[in-house]
Amino acid sequence: MSRQESNGRATRARQVAEREASRLARPDKPPVGSVVHSKRGSRLSTPFGSLQSPDTSGATQEEWCGPFSVARQMIAAREEARRLREEQQAAIDPDNKASHPLDYLHEQALLEKKRKENPSMNWVGDNNSKDDSASANYYVKRRSRVSKMRTGSGGKSCVPSLFHLCVDYIAKNFEHVETLGAVGHPVRRALCERLVELGEMNGAAFDVLAEKGVDTIELIDCAQVSEDQFCDALKICLPAGLKAIFLKHCGRCFGNQAAKILIDTKDIQLFALSLSGAYILKDSCAADLISATARTLSSIDLTACPLIGAKFCQSIADCYRIEGNCLLELALQNVQISKEALLSLDSESLRQLKSLKLKEIDSVDDEVVSILTKSIDGGSLENVDLSGNPQLTDDILSSIRRCNTDGNLRALQLSGLTNLTAIGLEAFFTSIDSLPAPPMLRKLDLSELASVNDSVVTLAAKAASFKRSVAETPMETLEVDDPNPELMGHKLAPMKGLVHINIAGSSITDKSLEVLASTCSSSLMELDVSFCTAISDKGLGYLVSKVGEQFTKLNVWGLAQLSDEFYDGHSSKSLEIMGVWMKISGGRSLR
């Protein structure tokens, strides 16, 4: 029998089955008779007078088990299975694209190409050393991780250095110390820090730290030091050759009386003055202090000094205009200075400036930055910090670029400048004929800038790492999106590249981490990628595996997407990770 005749006979049999199924199947249950005399004739001894039968209208009735009924059930089941299969396919592939036998091979080829262009995808964490007995206890793993991080030697016991042991012992018994003798400034600073940690930084401790013969007075916290006590120390230390004063949280410690002592001292040798929180220092006293010390004073740093104003700025302009007086560092933060006062700093007073810091000052705008940067001669500027000034725009980038004629700029901090755009930042790190070469930075802070993307980081890293001969070539000849960042190694200068990077809150991805791994492997020491939600375990793990042992600090605050694959699987033994989440990583949890 031919195949066509067999198929035709099967089709006719199916049609007959479908047509005769309703006649041959079990008939429906006949309805209850409604004869009139039957209701009168039947009587039941129930409260309602008649027996109520349960409602079975919603129940599925079983069909007759004949051959045609079985055929109907098979046909209905086939249609239902087809419907379920189509729904599952639609859920997997919403576009409902037609599949092809070679689709899998094509996808594998694309994945292999992507892995070659993004080497971080090949990184695999080393979790072989994980303690299996504590695998279910996340807090045990966290304690083990912290212990390993503190030791910095792969789990071996860590013994404090002799210097730290001595500093800790002396600080705990500081009430018995009468004098420190010829101890230098680094040791005194370490003792001051330890005393502040122990809560023992009082007036008696200050008398020992600021004794006669010291050349630097540096206090981390001056809250327990009175103005009279500080003035007495100045009267003793200034004639003996005091050269630098660094005071944090000085409050009442440094006021008009202390400034007057500095003004009245003859042959003063003070070259650095840093005050934080001097809220009683008047503008006129600060101006007189600058006039009295301008001959030797080359570094001025004032933070949170609310009474500083126009007289102070005018004194700087008048005193450092004189030949022989040289101002190298000017740092003003969180001070109430008007725009006119800042513009009074003319070109002659700032001609040799190396570090400029104007942070969190409401009056700072593009015009102020443009005028002050033009005042600096010879491109001697090495550090620029303009963080926290909301009025600044992309115009400041060209001003900074133009003043960097000699290529000496090494540190740039532009945190929180929300008006900066990605186009402006990319142009800043791109070679342009009419502008000096892009800066070869060592410290870069572009935190809290959503406009910072992979292109910006790539250009900044390449500008900081390329050899001088390569950096002088037009940047358009260098591909920004190289297929493989590892291929750029032969173009990099040894021991060059970014050292401190802060790109917290940016929109970077793992591509930026791959570029940093290839351009800053021998220089990177500190990285802050907090709140960068587009990076992953593989990107950070790849970066850590490529950089050297000098990379010791990583900030990952707010990165809930990171998991134990990176925290327990990275290869560095000396890396300190700040901001690790304290519950199950990789999901929503609490610190």
Image (tube, rainbow, N blue to C red):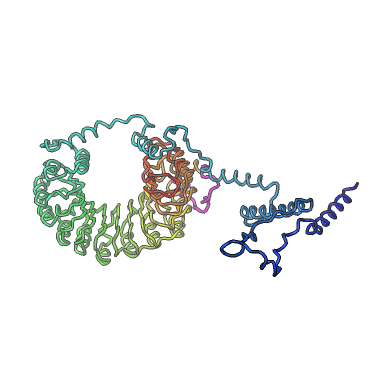
- Tell me where residue 446 appears, x and y as whole percent: 39, 54
Relative placement, left or right, of 263 versus 76 is: left
- Tell me where residue 528 appears, x and y as whole percent: 38, 48
Relative placement, left or right, of 278 versus 404 is: left
Q: Is residue 467 visible?
A: no
| Quadrant hosting residue 569 | top left
Residue 405 located within the stretch drawn in magenta: no
- Tell me where residue 148 appears, x and y as whole percent: 37, 35
Task: Give the magenta range.
Answer: 465-487
- Closer to the camera in the image, 548 or 466: 548
> Is the residue 383 above or below the residue 521 in the image?
below
> Is the residue 386 above or below the residue 240 in the image?
below
- What is the number of callouts on the image? 0
Q: Of all residues shown, which one is farthest toward the right? A: 1
Relative placement, left or right, of 40 versus 46 is: right
- Tell me where residue 487 appears, x and y as whole percent: 53, 42
- Closer to the camera in the image, 433 or 456: 456
Q: Residue at x 11, y 43 (%)?
A: 204
Q: Is residue 299 visible?
A: yes
Q: Residue at x 69, y 70 (%)?
A: 36
Residue 470 located within the stretch drawn in magenta: yes
Relative placement, left or right, of 551 versus 9 is: left
